[in-house]
Amino acid sequence: MLKKIARRTSFLRSLSTNHWRHLLRNLSEKEINWVLFWLGLAALSALFLSGYDYWILRSPAPAEGGAYTEGLMGEPRYLNPAISSASEVDRDITTLVFSGLVKHDKSGRIVPDLAASYEIKDGGKTYEFTLRENLTWPDKKPFTADDVVFTINLIKDPKYQSPLRNNWQGVRVEKIDDRRLTMKLPVQYEPFLENATVGVLPQHLWSGVQPQNFLLTQLNLKPVGLGQYTLTKITKNASGLIRSMEFSPNSRYYEKANISRLILRFYETQENIVNAYKRREIDGFSLSSVLEKDLLATARDVEFYNIKLPRYFAIFFNQSKSDKLTELAVRQALSQAVDRDFIVKEILKNEAEPQRGPFPFGLLEIGEPKINPEYDPEKAGAALGKAGWKIGSDGFREKKLKNAKSATRLEFVLTTTDWPELTQVASALKSDWEKIGVKVNLDVVPVNAIQNQTIRPRQYEALLFGEVLGLNPDPFSFWHSTQRKDPGLNLALYSNKKADGLLETSRQASDPEDRVKKYQSLQEIIMQDAPAVFLYSPNYIYAVSGKINGLDLKAVNTPSQRFENINSWYIATKRIKSDK
């Protein structure tokens, strides 16, 4: 039938205008209707075949094009992977602009990035990397092993004060040739490849920057990397503050991104970001609190990605700043008096899980600790009374401490940031503790100041803050006694020789079961000493416009890792021949 139609339409096309006029004058009405019927049938057949090819034989696929705008709170300062880890904004941008030897895939596994491959030798103490061929920096200078060696040696050099320095102590990085290098560890370290995700700096641009100018150079705000995107435009306001940055796909990256324009807008408050989304100024942002989800109830075309991160929030006690908190009975009672279920259900709207110990639930199947501080304010109050802390005339507990002339009130300062979620949690903790006679004063520090003003100098008595362990956890920097001072992250200034030993040997354990057993033992020691009160492990919530496709955020270590596979995100589509 189709062949017949084709022959007839071919014949009709060959006729000239005069032929048509002559033919139509000599055709009867019935014959004209017959011709029109076949012409219509031919047109419908052509449309059918075209539609069948487009809609049935082809399937939608990502295409280049479109623009994505995201809102971030704060302002970029150090777009440099050697020093960016202290700021969420800086981490986000360096993840876009820079690449490391390896990265995480969508399932959270370590895979090659700038390295084409790697080998682990010498019982896990030597890593040999082979770089991808023909990679060049944006100024067309070749990328070589020299750039990697330079970056790691810079991080190791104490004059540059990199917060990543502890990750590389004792590691020797040696060039074999332009495409190969080795990293030699003093002892086996199972999670080492996590360190190799750090972005690589171009040696030819950074080698002339002296340590005293390292934080001042313009390269920190005009980053040059080998990541998925390249910075193309910076917009400032009248005061000179950066208000937005625009990026385009890096044509020299081995997998070109689909989204043609990426714009990051910077806001002073999270409230401004939420309002910007409602006004459709931005297409996505990270929620700082589950409370913001309710503010978007009327927003159209928004999708929420609820991601479980290997992180938790806790109260870390600085016993060197408060003699009351040096008493184990006090710290244990404070933990027992906290209503974690109330925090999770009422404040966090079930977007979190109660946290009982130093490892988020489900991580490596470590399990919950045997010493489990269940909520029991009556027992907590009784324990304080037994320890000599009696209710005074003002309703708060007090006792006479050693060498004190008069009774000392059981009182301390709880410090946290000005995130709405954390201020609400801090208020709930204050209420819980004052019910058992403990006086609590709140100190709320702006989020952009808490690192330098409070955490780095350890200027707090008790700190409500969060820690991120990673999918392949190494709690060494959080609990080892050598990490009590900055840049270490031992926020409780915890010191225990048995714990130190387990932290050291667990890093070298190649057998997963052995490693888990060491972590379980470590967990029990920490819980027995009670240097912190573990509260909850929250979901990371990412709000994105429905026009953005290709997001797969099931397994990420940190919020900034959402950008590690941004090259698979897309807005525009095309239809391609299906394999079926």
Image (cartoon, rainbow, N blue to C red):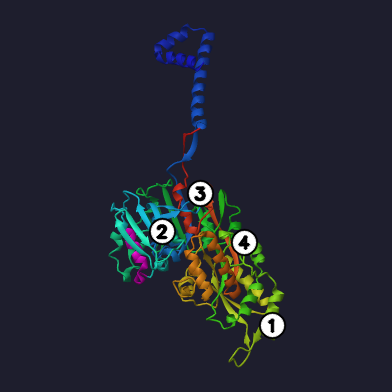
- Mark 4, mark 1: which one is toward the viewer? 1
Nearer the observer, 443 or 341: 341
The earlier-in-sequence mark between 4 and 3 is 4
Horizontal and vertical percent position of residue 480: 49, 72
Q: CA distance from mark 2 to mark 4?
A: 30 Å
| Numbered mark located on residue 353 in the image | 4
Q: Is residue 436 left or right of residue 79?
A: right
Using the rendered image of the protein, determine whether residue 243 is visible from the camera's viewpoint.
no
Asked if residue 170 is among those painted magenta in the image, a careful observer would answer: no
Amino acid type indicated by mark 2: Thr
Mark 2 surroundings: few (<14), some (14-19) or many (≥20) residues within 10 A: many
The earlier-in-sequence mark between 2 and 1 is 2
Horizontal and vertical percent position of residue 434: 66, 77
Residue at screen point 39% across, 53% down: 118
What is the quadrant of residue 403 in the picture? bottom right
Amino acid type indicated by mark 1: Lys
Residue receiving disc 1: 386
Horizontal and vertical percent position of residue 444: 54, 73
Q: Is residue 89 left or right of residue 225?
A: right
Residue receiving disc 2: 94
Q: CA distance from mark 2 to mark 3?
A: 19 Å
The total of numbered circles placed on residues is: 4
Horizontal and vertical percent position of residue 9: 45, 16
Residue receiving disc 3: 551
